[in-house]
Image (cartoon, rainbow, N blue to C red):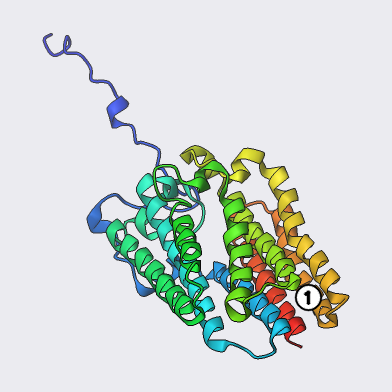
Amino acid sequence: MAASTRKKRPHGGSQKKQPRGNPQKAHVSRDPRAVTPATRGDWIGAARLRTLPLAVTPVLIGTGAALIVEPRLHWVIALCCLIVAVALQVGVNYANDYSDGIRGTDDHRVGPARLTASRKAKPRTVLIVALAFFALAAIAGLAIVIRTQHWWMLLIGAACIVAAWFYTGGKRPYGYAGLGELFVFVFFGLVATIGTTFVQVGIVPQEAWFGAVAAGMLACAVLLANNLRDIDQDRVAGKRTLTVRIGKRATQVLYTVLVLLPFGIAAVLALVYPIAWLTLLALIPAAAAILIVWTYRLPRELVVALALTSLTSVAVGGFLFWAFAG
């Protein structure tokens, strides 16, 4: 009888909790012993090589515009500009891995697992790698300043590094407030392209401005494709990207506009520089990317659109360089 009067324990405690994170992949075990340390491939993947063409494009366009003013290639300065751009791009990718990882934002991502969120690498290690690339960009930038004697450009370089960090870093990252595309347009479009031209020849022709706008638009398009892929997960994580704010359909429209407008700019430039008509060849990957963005069923399909948009960007940059240099 005593046993029959014993209160039954509630069954709620034995229920399994729903896993967080990528719904399309097995949840990473929270048991530290079950986590495999990051391999070289994991570190390379975290650098997000698909985005690196965005760093090359403005340097190509800016150098080409400089050759219009002075037909002698300043290859040392151009190389340093490329190092700055690539190092900043890789640095911001690792910084995002660190910042999103410690916030828990990447627990909901659909794309490839990140180093910090997957616990394959210690957050401090990822942070150190990010800072190392920022330092490399600073050293290359300092070399440019010493060679050109444009000391005021140290402020521009510092602003670039600060913008790279606070995209997802700090207490109020602007990438979480829907301002990511604006800053990408300014720094990976205008500043990178115009800066590359200025440090080589000391002036900025209108061709550099046209090319800077084109490069900035394509960089924004890549970010939109990335954020469209993560729109549902970002909503859950409280990351208010521009895509989250305006919705899927408006993002698709804006992405299409940003991809196609650079070809209009190239067509205008082609009236003076006929080789620029070859940029129309880049419509092939651009059209494929646009088609994916409008017809995708699974978010991971947008990874291909992102890569195709990056390819479009560097192709446009390469053809404009050829047009200006020729």
Q: Position of residue 202 (x, y in %)?
A: 62, 77
Does residue 229 appear to the left or right of 20 in the view shown?
A: right
Vertical arrangement, residue 69 with respect to residue 300, above or below: below
What residue sits 66% from the left and 62% below the top?
Answer: 216
Name of the residue lying farthest toward the left: 2
Disc 1 residue type?
Thr
Q: Position of residue 104 (x, y in %)?
A: 39, 45
Quarter location, residue 260: bottom right
Q: Assign a secondary structure to mark 1.
A: helix
Quarter location, residue 40: bottom left
What residue sits 34% from the left and 62% below the top?
Answer: 126
What residue sits 36% from the left and 36% below the top?
Answer: 17
What residue sits 42% from the left and 47% below the top?
Answer: 107
Q: Position of residue 31 (x, y in %)?
A: 25, 51
Residue designated by label 1: 279
- How many badges with numbers are in the image? 1
Q: Position of residue 87 (x, y in %)?
A: 46, 71
